[in-house]
Image (cartoon, rainbow, N blue to C red):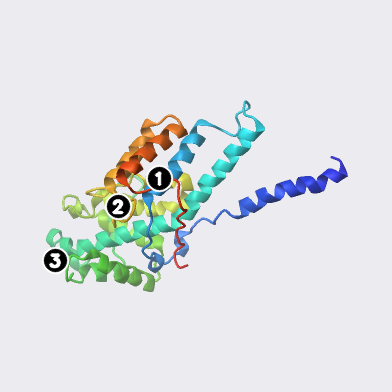
Amino acid sequence: MRPFLVPFVVVLCLPLAARADRLPGKLRLTDQPPSLCARQPVNFSRLIYRFNVRNLHLSQHSASDPGLSTKERNRIIRMQHSLKRLARRWAPGTVSHLTRAVAAELAALRLTLPQVLSPGDLRQLQVWHRGPGGELSPRPAPPWLSRFLLTPARSYSAEEAIAPLLGAATASGATVADFARAAEGIFNTPALRRSGFGGEAWARVAQTIRSYDTTPDVRWFDTVFFLEHNTGSVLCRFGGAGNDGRTLRKLLNAREQSSTASELMGHFRRIMRQAGSGAGPGPRQEPVRPGA
């Protein structure tokens, strides 16, 4: 390479380096106390729209395809980075949403446990975890969780109990990962299988929270979008703009029915016009990292 071309090449590479530096770091749930999971308005319709349009395009093209032009290959690389950046940016708000949903379900269990457990089981509350072979085995529940669940609930207002529960877990030194594991163990309680509360559906939600640290960002969101609790989508647990259960289901079905990104965009825009939620292109909604 001629010497006078070196500065020119360096200048061209600087924007790419700066773009790479803007990728947010991956959230580590083993470092996050549950009390940082503050309520954040997450518009999941908007997230599903942006996420799946990029994901569908990338599933049909590869940057390693020898038939691609340099321009198209660079475009795919930029879209891969954009999808990962999108997942990292929305992960804190999504983890907070799921953690608060699990906390609300634990609060609701305070009215159910006395009806399904014997007095002896209540005095020595246990969590149930699956072993390598899938079998459930009990162990003592963490003290902070036992104290919360065995304190009589004054009302069914589960949301009022979220902050005290997350605060109690944090005061004990538990992290978000610890909180999710303890919740998963309670939801696995055999006596809850037919109670309408907890059970396998909520155990999967808690397990999904725990899996974030060890799961690639894009794959983790592919799981989150389809999480269901006992009566509907976990994503619409607290309502809010863009979180109508019927609309979310239509958006996810459109992903399965579309063969190209442009076709998917058409489906999404039509669904959002009917819902009046405005999940398509518009002002960017930036979720806030817990504790910020």
Kindly identify which residue carries mark 3.
Answer: 119
Q: Which mark is residue 48?
A: 1
The percent coordinates of residue 139 (x first, y second) are 29, 60
Q: Type of residue at label 3?
A: Pro
Q: Earlier in the sequence, mark 1 or mark 2?
A: 1
Apparent side of residue 60 relative to residue 34 in the rendered image (left or right)? right
The percent coordinates of residue 93 (x first, y second) are 41, 58
Query: Mark 1 or 3, which is nearer the eye?
Result: 1
Tag 2, which secondary structure? helix
Q: Earlier in the sequence, mark 1 or mark 3?
A: 1
Q: Is residue 130 visible?
A: no
Apparent side of residue 214 relative to residue 117 in the rendered image (left or right)? right
Q: Residues within 10 Å of mark 3 (few under 14, many from 20)?
A: few
- The one nearer the camera, 59 or 41, is 41
Q: Type of residue at label 2?
A: Cys
Q: Is residue 288 visible?
A: yes
Kindly identify which residue carries mark 2.
Answer: 236
Q: CA distance from mark 2 to mark 3?
A: 35 Å
Q: Earlier in the sequence, mark 2 or mark 3?
A: 3
Q: Residues within 10 Å of mark 1 (few under 14, many from 20)?
A: many
